[in-house]
Image: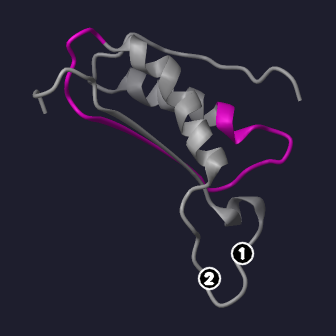
Amino acid sequence: RRDGDFFPLTVNYDEKMYAAGKIPGGFKKREGRPGDDATLTARLIGRPIRPLFPKGYKHDVQIMNMVLSADPDCSPHMAAMIGSSMALSVSDIPFQGPLAGVHVGY
């Protein structure tokens, strides 16, 4: 897409319940829509990545992060950020990365 004056970057972060060893119970066995934590993590990933694209780049870019398995001692949020940066770095998209992130605090 080349119309518009913005860069259409979409970042999705989805943490499945079975990644933490839980299966939804009750009548509905499906996962619900992403919660606030997933939305904030997607924004946490997208904000430092957006300025690393060249000015005037107008093509749609989607970054999909899906946590399938997680270790309770490690943050899947930072792994998703670094994985997103690495995926963009090895692609043909003009990305001026890579990017690294750390989680400071508890």
Q: CA distance from mark 1 to mark 2?
A: 8 Å
Label 2 sits on residue? 29
Viewer-proximal residue among 36 and 12: 36
Q: Where is residue 53? Give x, y as percent.
A: 33, 14
Quadrant where the C terminus is found in the figure: top right
Residue 27 horizontal side relative to residue 59, left or right:
right
Query: Residue at coordinates 40% horizontally, 12% vertically from top-left?
Result: 52
Tag 1: amino acid: Ile
Q: Where is residue 70? Give x, y as percent.
A: 73, 50
Given contact means CB atoms under 8 Å apart, are the residues at marks 1 and 2 in contact? yes
Corner quadrant of residue 76 = top right
Residue 33 horizontal side relative to residue 56, left or right:
right
Viewer-proximal residue among 40 and 53: 40
Q: Is 34 drawn above or below residue 25 in the view shown?
A: above
Quadrant where the N terminus is found in the figure: top left
Q: Is 74 drawn above or below residue 32 in the view shown?
A: above
Residues shaded magenta: 54-78
Can residue 78 be seen here? The reply is yes
Q: Few, some or many C-alpha atoms within 10 Å of disc 2 (few <14, some 14-19, many ≥20)?
A: few
Q: Is residue 34 magenta?
A: no
Label 1 sits on residue? 23
Query: Residue at coordinates 68% horizontally, 64% vertically from top-left?
Result: 17
